[in-house]
Image (cartoon, rainbow, N blue to C red):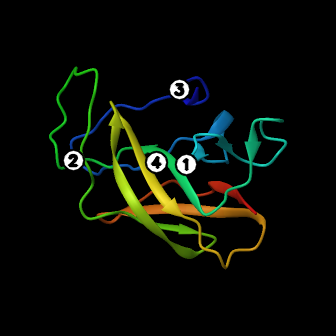
Amino acid sequence: MLRHLFSIGKARDSAESPSFFVFNSGPYITSTHLNESLIGSTSLYPGNSTPASPGIAVYANGFGSTTVPVVAGAETQSGTLAPLPVVTIGGVNATVLFAGLVAPGEFQLNVVVPPSLSSADQPVTATYKGFTTQAGTLITVQ
């Protein structure tokens, strides 16, 4: 379902330009609850999106090399990022449980939303090996 809502970028060999996939050209990042239901305000996709709860998955590209080398042209890709990226939500560090390549050019980061955040649209960033995702991206937290 997600592949129809965002475009998938090209896999890279180094961390050059990490960026979140976003819904409808942004600013909301492409993210799901761990049960794979969409995260967003209830008006983002009425009846299909709800605000973020503690455990979420966010999707991105451009993080670079993983523990398993990327194979050009392969239909499947895997491998984890080491070290884990630093993710902040609302300016607060979020715990990253997993970060890895789950499809060609598609990274998934499983994170725990900081419980101290207020219910609102919160800015979100990921930093990896000195590179930071694009500015102005948001996630709806409740």
Residue at image position (57%, 30%) is 2
Instruction: State how far apart marks 1 and 4 are (Cα).
Output: 21 Å
Residue at image position (51%, 28%) is 7
- The answer to which image quadrant residue 30 occupies is top right
Classify mark 1: helix, strand or loop. loop
* Location of residue 110 in the rendering, given as x and y in whole percent from the top left corner: 46, 55
37 and 45: which one is in front? 37
Choose mark 2 or mark 4, whichever is in front: 2
The amino acid type found where label 2 is placed reads: Ser
Choose mark 1 or mark 2, whichever is in front: 1
The earlier-in-sequence mark between 2 and 4 is 4
Instruction: State how far apart marks 2 and 4 are (Cα).
Output: 15 Å
* Location of residue 56 in the rendering, given as x and y in whole percent from the top left corner: 56, 54
- The answer to which image quadrant residue 84 occupies is bottom left
Choose mark 1 or mark 3, whichever is in front: 1
Horizontal placement of 5 versus 48: left or right?
left
Instruction: State how far apart marks 3 and 4 are (Cα).
Output: 16 Å
Q: Which mark is residue 107?
A: none
Q: Which mark is residue 19?
A: 4
Q: Which mark is residue 65?
A: 2
Instruction: State how far apart marks 2 and 3 are (Cα).
Output: 22 Å
Q: Circle 1 sits on which residue?
A: 34
Instruction: State how far apart marks 1 and 2 are (Cα).
Output: 25 Å
Q: Circle 3 sits on which residue?
A: 3
The earlier-in-sequence mark between 2 and 3 is 3
Classify mark 4: helix, strand or loop. strand
Mark 3 packing: few (<14 Cα in 10 Å), some, or many (20+)? few
